[in-house]
Image: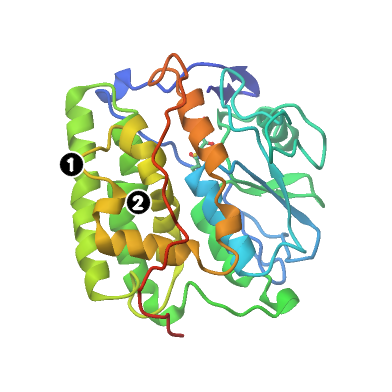
Amino acid sequence: MGQLVNGIWDPSWYDTKSTGGRFERTVTRFRNWITPDGAPGPSGTGGFAAESGRYHLYVSYACPWAHRTLIFRALKGLAPHIGVSVVHPDMLADGWTFAGDFPGATGDRLHGLPFLRDLYTRAVPDVSGRVTVPVLWDTASGAIVSNESSEIIRMFNSAFDGLTGNTADFWPEPLRAAIEAVNDRIYPGFNNGVYRAGFATTQDAYDTAVQEVFDTLDWLEDLLTRQPFLAGERVTEADWRLFTTLVRFDMVYHLHFKCNRRRLIDYPALWAYTRQLYQWPGVAATVKMDHIVRHYHYSHDTINPNRIIPINPVLDFTAPHGRPAPRG
Ligand SMILES: N[C@@H](CCC(=O)N[C@@H](CS)C(=O)NCC(=O)O)C(=O)O
């Protein structure tokens, strides 16, 4: 993987030398918001009104951040309104590509571009920074609305409700403080924690990160033994953000990122909760384990230089979960 520097592709791997072996995720660049009437959102500029067929989502099925946006697209009935292009799972010297030789990789459905980086430079020719998924693209202005998944899911949660009539709310006002509190713990300790463990290039950086991963899992196991969902009785954004890391845990993070003190299936509440979310209407179809397994093991050649794809356990996400039915 590499990055763009003033519009030119630099194919270097993450630099962890300047950060004592620690992996530090860079800040996302495009932060505009789709709103019902095109008024500006909490950041960026306005002009992105919710309209059917206007926006397009670029994802990798492997990526946990992009996965959140696919889940919200499904839960909020947005599939007829927002198209999707899926990159190839192999992310090598050219970064994410639109090669079509993997089942489910669609190519760039809008422009037929070869590489995701070409989409970034199409929007901003001299752009600098990492070329990441997800990308929410505006076909009307040829701009990137956002490449920040945590914000794309909040747009999807409500901006199109007038169009879809789907008012399911995963960011309900009374629970916002509780949701933010769990997000603030789960993002560094778990969602990004597994990456900090996996991409660490010193023992110290790894030790710190992996300890946080399992401290977070212990805390979550206890919480989900006492209550159905992270913010209480209702499923919220916080649960979907957690789910995309949980569903990858035993298949990739356990081995590939060396998060191997325990497996997900060793935590009874968390494992049942993961199955419950997997079985939620519309969600299973967003989980593409072939892309997930292939991407991590094949793309990260600093971790797995021979690109051997491991045999992996067989997990039954469809087994009965036995957890209480959701409210609200
Ligand atoms: N803050 C972004 C992070 C997205 C992200 O890091 N995506 C990864 C894939 S899982 C990526 O595209 N990485 C390519 C790179 O860093 O060069 C979000 O949540 O949307």
Residue 262 can be seen, yes or no: yes
User: How far apart in space, not on screen, are marks 1 and 2 (Cα)?
Assistant: 14 Å
For residue 119, above or below residue 154: above
The number of numbered badges drawn on the structure is 2
Left or right relative to 160: residue 284: left
Identify the residue at horizontal 28%, vertical 46% (top origin): 263
Q: Secondary structure at mark 2?
A: helix
Residue 71: x and y, percent?
Answer: 56, 59
Which residue is identified by label 2?
A: 187
| Rendering colour mode | rainbow
How would you rate the neighbour count of disc 1 (Cα within 10 Å): few for under 14, some for 14-19, many for 20 or more? Answer: some
What's the amino acid at mark 1?
Gln
Residue 81: x and y, percent?
Answer: 76, 63
Q: Point out the residue furthest to the bottom here.
A: 328
Residue 152 can be seen, yes or no: no
Which residue is identified by label 1?
A: 211
Q: Considering depth in this image, is 97 or 136 the residue closer to the camera?
A: 97
Left or right relative to 247: residue 165: right
For residue 249, above or below residue 170: above
What's the amino acid at mark 2?
Tyr
Q: Ligand 1: does it lie within 8 Å of the C-beta at label 1?
A: no
Q: Secondary structure at mark 1?
A: helix
